[in-house]
Image (tube, grey):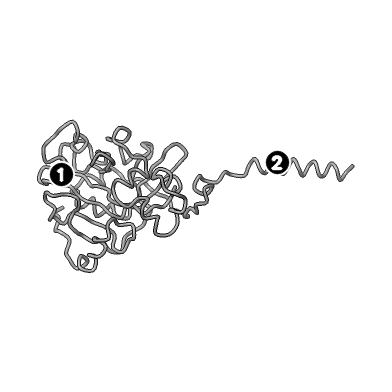
């Protein structure tokens, strides 16, 4: 009788313990091994209250965070481009204030999302004081958290989470927007300084060892200006051509920027 009671007690305790076992994150359920990530602290609006060239360089190494309900995705910013506003022929703001680019002339730290080539979105973040247009384009991320969710949104197989195929998750502005489910109807104008917005940028203490300055790509106007910045040696930087230029670009001095 005592043995039977003991077994019943053990069974009850086992059920109670199972009820208190925390559920694994979505990525782990899909076979994804998540990194032990440090805490990410959101960047204040003052961070963006300055020249886009300064903001662009300072954004390298920071973390783009996407929160969709209980699902979170993180990616380290490894490649960006600066756009300087009315003085930059390649900038959307060069034509002046329009309904499409209104976010660029608003408060700094807001998401400016546009649709291009009829098939993908691009994410930018506004810079400079309100009334002055400038922004930084996110070109590539190194995926850190939520890789399984990124792969599903990109229509990629689970094997993309391992090896060189991981580059296809967030390398390039269109891919990173698709992986993070970023669209103009949903995210344009979002306050990217607030974690409550679901799309924000934070600092986890990482600092890149070396930053490369190069010309912007995919444009015809002002293409010669060295306004593209990326982390040297990072495998997630978009385009093999840029990576092959690193050895020469490293010795090139970055443009002088007044404070």
Q: Where is residue 176 in the image (x, y as percent from the top left)?
A: 33, 47
Label 2 sits on residue? 15
Q: How many marks?
A: 2
In screen coordinates, is 108 left or right of 86?
A: right
Q: In which quarter of the image is the N terminus?
A: top right
Circles 2 and 1 in contact, beta carbons < 8 Å: no
Which mark is nearer the camera, 2 or 1? 1
Mark 2 to mark 1: distance in Å?
A: 61 Å
**Compared with residue 111, is residue 147 higher up or lower down, i.e. above or below?**
below
User: Helix or strand or loop: what does disc 2 sit on?
Assistant: helix
109 sits left or right of 88 in the view: right
Q: Is residue 104 above or below residue 250?
A: above
Residue 125, position in %: x, y?
25, 43
Q: In this view, does 240 lie to the left or right of 180?
A: left
Q: Residue 158 location, x and y as percent?
A: 47, 50
Q: How crowded is mark 2: few (under 14 residues within 10 Å), some or many (20 or more)?
A: few
Identity of the residue drawn at 38% across and 37% down: 196
Residue 83 on image: x %, y %: 17, 47
Q: Residue at x 14, y 40 (%)?
A: 93
Give the numbered dot on residue 216: none
Q: Name the residue beneath numbered marker 1.
A: 91
Mark 2 or mark 1: name the one nearer the start of the chain. Answer: 2
Choose between 57 and 101: the one closer to the eye: 101
């Amino acid at each position: 009788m005592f043995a039977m009671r003991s077994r019943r007690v053990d069974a009850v305790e086992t059920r109670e313990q199972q009820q208190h076992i925390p559920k694994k994150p979505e990525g782990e359920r899909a076979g994804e091994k998540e990194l032990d990530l440090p805490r990410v602290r959101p960047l204040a609006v003052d961070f963006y209250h300055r020249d886009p060239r300064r903001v662009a360089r300072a954004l390298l190494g920071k973390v783009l965070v996407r929160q969709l309900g209980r699902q979170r995705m993180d990616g380290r910013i490894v490649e960006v481009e600066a756009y300087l506003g009315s003085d930059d022929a390649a900038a959307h703001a060069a034509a002046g204030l329009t309904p499409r680019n209104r976010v660029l002339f608003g408060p700094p730290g807001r998401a400016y999302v546009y649709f291009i080539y009829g098939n993908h979105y691009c994410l930018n973040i506004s810079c400079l004081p309100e009334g002055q247009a400038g922004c930084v384009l996110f070109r590539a991320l190194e995926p850190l958290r939520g890789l399984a969710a990124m792969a599903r949104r990109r229509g990629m197989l689970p094997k993309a989470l391992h090896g060189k195929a991981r580059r296809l998750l967030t390398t390039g502005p269109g891919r990173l927007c698709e992986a993070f489910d970023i669209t103009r109807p949903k995210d344009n104008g979002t306050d990217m300084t607030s974690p409550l917005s679901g799309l924000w940028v934070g600092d986890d203490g990482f600092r890149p060892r070396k930053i490369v300055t190069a010309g912007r790509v995919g444009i015809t106007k002002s293409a010669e200006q060295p306004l593209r910045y990326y982390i040297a040696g990072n495998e997630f930087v978009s385009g093999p051509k840029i990576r092959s230029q690193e050895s020469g670009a490293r010795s090139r001095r970055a443009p002088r920027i007044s404070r």
